[in-house]
Image (cartoon, helix red, strand yellow):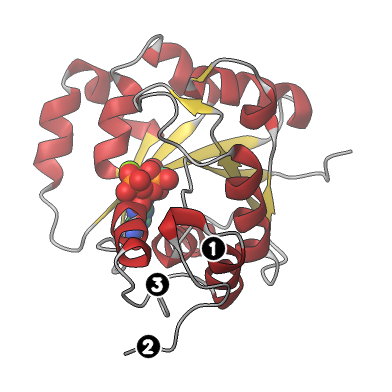
Amino acid sequence: MAKTVHKLGIMGGTFDPIHYGHLVTAEAVRAEFHLDQVLFVPTGQPAHKPPGTTTDAKHRYTMAVLATLTNPHFDVSRVDIERPGYTYTIDTLTDLRKIYGPATEFYFITGADAILEILSWKEPDELFRLSAFVAATRPGYDLDRLEHALGDLYRRHADQIKVIEVPAMAISSTDIRERVRSGRPIRYLVPETVASYIYKNGLYGATTPVPPDDP
Ligand code: ATP
Ligand code: MG
């Protein structure tokens, strides 16, 4: 049973693996918009990535749980993992609307580039009916770029599009996977529990059962 939540942040992602960029962003948005809770929603098969290239959902989900354990405002949802087929944001929001009911305000949190991808998918107007969108940008990002790229959609839904500057934007899952594969440190990029989980389960080509000492 879901708790009564007035304002809910929703952070969808592959989380392969979850990292401090995601966590810092979620916390910044939570504080800025006074959200009661932020829900991390690991994708099933992401629509924009080739099948077979994404780590098993059970690992991505478990790492998200480990990473969010110490924040009482963070939670992890299985809605996208349990829905068969590709993950589309419209389905995520529709499923969560059924769970939380009509009164909860939704804030879907994405990187500024990911927002463009999501809104170029199907039914963008319906997406805005279900949720506001918070785009996290690097400090200094040119907002006009977003306005330009969204065009008409931006003008129709300007009140539903919010932007926040986040300092940890340079961290990426791609870089973390490459670091593990090549034996470079991931300490301070992901929570220690997530690093331990990666090495214990041999994810991303890890060859030692515990994170190696930093060189
Ligand atoms: P990959 O490198 O595999 O694409 P990623 O680091 O971009 O992974 P995702 O799981 O694809 O992580 O991202 C989930 C969401 O978090 C997206 O909306 C993305 O724009 C956003 N995001 C990714 N990295 C950061 C970051 N460092 N700071 C803030 N938001 C981020
Ligand atoms: Mg990405």
Q: Which residue is mark 3?
A: 189
Is 119 left, or right, of 8 in this rendering?
left
How far across and how far down the image is residue 172, in percent?
32, 57
Which residue in the rendered view is the most extreme toward the top?
Answer: 123
Quadrant housing residue 214 = bottom left
Disc number for residue 128: none
Residue 157 visible: no
**Vertical comparison of 157 with 114: above or below:** above
* Amino acid of disc 1: Ile
Q: Is residue 40 above or below residue 171?
A: above
Q: Are marks 1 and 2 in contact (CB under 8 Å)?
A: no
Q: Disc 1 on helix, strand or loop? A: helix
- Cα separation between marks 1 and 2: 15 Å
Circle 2 residue: 214
**Which residue is nearer to you in this view: 162 or 167?**
167
Number of the label disc, if any, that sits on residue 198: 1
Question: Which image quarter holds the N terminus?
Answer: top right
Mark 2 or mark 3, earlier in chain? 3
Judge the density around disc 3: few (<14), some (14-19), many (≥20) Cα neighbours within 10 Å: some
Q: Viewer-proximal residue, 193 or 11?
A: 193
Asked which secondary structure carries label 2, the reply is loop
